[in-house]
Amino acid sequence: MILNCEHGFYSFIPEDMDDQAYFEAATGYKLVRFADGLTFAPLADLPCVSIKGQPYGGLTAGVNYCGLPEDVIRANGFVFDLAARKLAPLSAVTKTLELYPQVNGALIAVDELPQAGAVYNRQRLLSFSGVARWQNRQFILRTYELQNQSN
């Protein structure tokens, strides 16, 4: 299955007929149809516009913004929290990731889907794309966006 997480907005494109079933069994997350692929139900319903001070995905929008849902959540400083299964402020994500760097530049997460906004090597993982390999229980992040954390 192809994985995409743009600014905390997760989407998936099945490569094989059974990918959705494998994903749901391996992760415990239910996926719904969205555009040409799949996503989590709370993300499928997000509007393309946020208005400062108004509700947006269960949080209060901090800015006026119009664009794709992944751009709107980035503009507002939100990500999808996998554990809570809802939007959360990026600053509220405290999880630390265990990722394994590869010679080709990829990062591998084992057993669990990486949380957008989580910290890896003193950097926050904002976005990534890659593939899931069910036989190895691996999520291979081929491209990713990391943000340095200032202390």
Image (tube, rainbow, N blue to C red):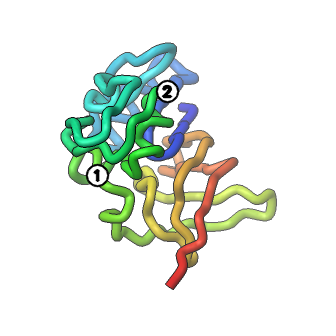
Q: Is residue 66 left or right of residue 31?
A: right
Give x and y (percent) for residue 81.
31, 51
For numbered disc 1, what is the local secondary structure?
strand
* Residue type pointed to by label 1: Ala
Residue located at (42% from left, 71% from top): 96
Of mark 2 and mark 1, the one earlier in the sequence is 2
Q: Residue furthest right?
A: 104
Give the position of the N terminus as an image quadrant: top right
Give x and y (percent) for residue 35.
46, 14
Residue located at (61% from left, 42% from top): 129
Q: Which residue is mark 2?
A: 67
Query: How many numbered discs sit on the rendered protein?
Result: 2
Residue located at (39% from left, 36% from top): 64
Q: Which residue is mark 1?
A: 88
* 61 over 43 or under it: above or below: below
Dot 2 surroundings within 10 Å: few (below 14), some, or many (20 or more)? few
* Residue type pointed to by label 2: Gly
Name the image quarter holding residue 69.
top left
